[in-house]
Amino acid sequence: MTDKSPIENTPLTATRIEQVEQDLRFWADKPIDISFDPKGTPLFSMIELARSYARRSVVLADAIRLLLAKNHIVPAAVLGRALIETVAMGCLYLHDMGRLIAAKDRDRLESKLARFYAGVKGKKIDPVHVMDAMRHLEKIDVAYVEYLDRKYALFTHLMEMLKASGEDVDESFGEIVSVIRTYNRLSEVSHPNGTGTQFLFPDESNETEAVKEARTRFRMASLIAIWHGRHLVAALEQRADLPERYRMEFGTG
């Protein structure tokens, strides 16, 4: 038996998360269709990597759903953390590709692409650090939440719905869905500390209400991780014209 979280008990939020999953799947399955011959350029690899972030996100989201269906909260939280990192890296990648094309800096563009595409810690090509990606995602997320609530009062409305459903929520909706807050919360159980081990895997005789509430909280955080996939969807949409912009600045061949 599973104890659904407030997110799952509110149809509007549940539907929005499902829409993010559909949008991610669209980009994951979208063929690479460049309107000109990209031979002599890194464009195929550039677009392939962008799609790969979406495909990895879809697989992680699917696995989270399967684990939550079995009430396996800890592995779902571990994958939720990995999903947020994937979204963050994909967003930073697309931002950097667009920024360096606009700067007309082909050498730096190809160097940065190599770091995203082939970087391995301790090897010749140094990878992009995940925390650089997380800092970039946090900036995007804060601006996004403020914009939506200012323009549509979306999160205010969702918070009212949660409270009306009888949920005891002591945070603002912006706090609940904050990407860095969600990431930090998922990290609590991704590491085998007290919260992620004894507290969530107690003896049957010690199944307290506090333990059940903790499972619900981390269950919700795992689902919110899927919701944050919207940032990757937005980045993919905004940078869909990378091949054309590349050709405009550098030509082909």
Image (cartoon, rainbow, N blue to C red):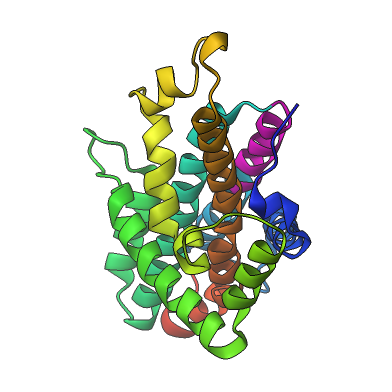
Q: Nearer the viewer, residue 228 or 173?
A: 173
* Residue 252: percent from left, percent from top: 50, 73
At x 71%, y 26%, the residue is 70
* Residue 231: percent from left, percent from top: 53, 65
Q: Can residue 53 be spotted in the picture?
A: no
Q: How many marks?
A: 0
Residue that lies at the very extreme toward the bottom in this rendered image = 151
**Where does the N terminus fall, quadrant-wise?**
top right
Range covered by the magenta-colored residues: 57-70
Q: Relative to 23, is 49 above or below?
A: above
Q: Nearer the viewer, residue 193 or 129?
A: 193
122 in the magenta segment: no
Q: Quadrant of residue 47?
A: bottom right
* Residue 24: percent from left, percent from top: 67, 57
At x 55%, y 62%, the residue is 232
Q: Nearer the viewer, residue 113 or 82?
A: 82
* Residue 43: percent from left, percent from top: 52, 63
Q: Relative to 167, is 1 above or below?
A: above
Q: Quadrant of residue 124?
A: top left
Q: Main secondary structure of the magenta part?
A: helix
At x 53%, y 43%, the residue is 217
Q: Can residue 200 be spotted in the picture?
A: yes
Q: Relative to 240, is 169 above or below?
A: above
Would residue 195 appear left or right of 16 to someone viewing this image? left
Q: Quadrant of residue 142?
A: bottom left
At x 50%, y 81%, the residue is 245
